[in-house]
Amino acid sequence: MSDILLQFDEVDVVPTTGFAKHIATGGPVWPEFEHQVDARHCRGEVPVDSLPARRDAVARITTPAVWGGILDRHFGHLVAEHLPRLPHSLRERPDDLYLFTIEPGLTEADLPSHIWDLLAWYGVARAQVRIVTEPLRVACLRVAPQAEMLPLVAPSHSYLALLEARAQANALTSDLNEVLYVTRSGLVAEGQGGHAGEGYLVERLRDQGVAVMDPSCLPLRAQLAGYAGAANLVFAEGSAVHGRQILGRLPQEIHVLRRRPGRSVARAMLRPRCTRLTYHSTSAALLTDTFPNGRPRPGSAAAIYDRHVLFSAFAALGVDLSEGWDEGDFHAAQIDDLRGWIAHHAPSPAQLDAHRSLLAGLGLDLDALTALPAPIALPGSAPVASGAV
């Protein structure tokens, strides 16, 4: 028997009945459920799922099967905490049936294409996948522990070696670039989290010959080829950061432009994969939506660049953002994004007044698209607020 995979006999597997914060209620009803750890969904090495309600099985699977997890439609969470079971599983059971659940109310047709691309990359053929939509009894079910997990559980060297072998088996090529910037441009105007005016930053980078990638517009292989070939990989903080977890160790520096102060997304996962990892505190302020209980919702916040930090971060990579920078065009790009963000979040009059007040303190007038007569003076004039780890 494997020293990695766990094996259980006569296990009931049920569809998901709940899904909150990317944690599913459903899946295998493991024997002695409360005492299982490695077989369950964990964060910080602590189980966070709950015992699924057992239901009478309508079918029995007698062929060898492996539990794969829930096919979360969110790219970042899928890669970071649901699929890290697969490399060890496939090394030992490459031909078995792989069982997955999906979010309640969805069908297989609702799954985005990147899910199938990821499964294929790891080596799970579509014919091997069975999505559990009715209660099953599985004669022999195997499961690998999560090889890495949120928030700060790092991968082992043996796991990274499996990822490197997978890239080689998939004949991954590298798109060579000294600097590759991975953008979230356009998402703020759609009400999502990001830096206002990032589209203007992208224009300036491209004008200086810097490679820019929008992962939402590229197939998985093209994304990975870009990541693999970048000497300096710069991410706008977001789910795309987790895409780098699909690959193993590479001789490169990784930089993350924070939009949420103090957040070091995927730090434990990225650090073993590169030669240097740096997070840059590129936000001077945040406009936040709120949860129903009144608490701020930082994940969907619109961030205002601290351009002193932003310029310094790129200058260290040989990119002078001040060359060709136009204050009026940047200001207009910021306002366009912020207007879209506010329209999507429909803040209350009190919240809107707070946003106006915050922006006014940064020299931004939400009601005007005219260029500023002078450069915006952002707080925090120190050259760089960043830290290598």
Image (spheres, rainbow, N blue to C red):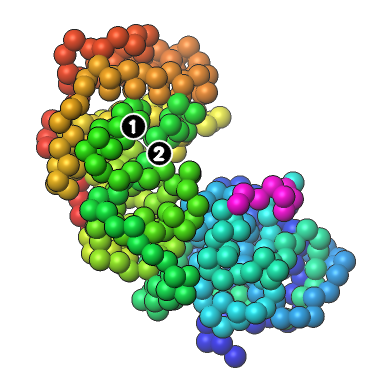
SS assignment at label 2: loop
State which quarter of the image contains the N terminus. Answer: bottom right
Residue pointed to by mark 1: 198
Q: Amino acid at mark 2?
A: Arg
Distance between the alpha carbons at the discs numbered 2 and 1: 8 Å
Residue pointed to by mark 2: 184
Q: Determine the residue located farthest toward the bottom in the rendered image.
A: 1
- Residue 295 appearing in the image: no
Callout 2–callout 1 Cβ contact below 8 Å: yes
Count of numbered labels shown in the rendering: 2
Which residue does the image show at 20% across and 50% down from the upper left?
A: 387
State which quarter of the image contains the C terminus. Answer: bottom left
Please state which of residues 365 and 371 is positioned toward the viewer in this rendering: 371
Label 2 neighbour load within 10 Å: few <14, some 14-19, many 20+: many
Q: Residue 108 colored magenta?
A: yes
| Position above or below: 289 against 167 | above
Left or right of 287? Residue 80 is right
Q: Amino acid at mark 1?
A: Glu
Left or right of 219? Residue 134 is right
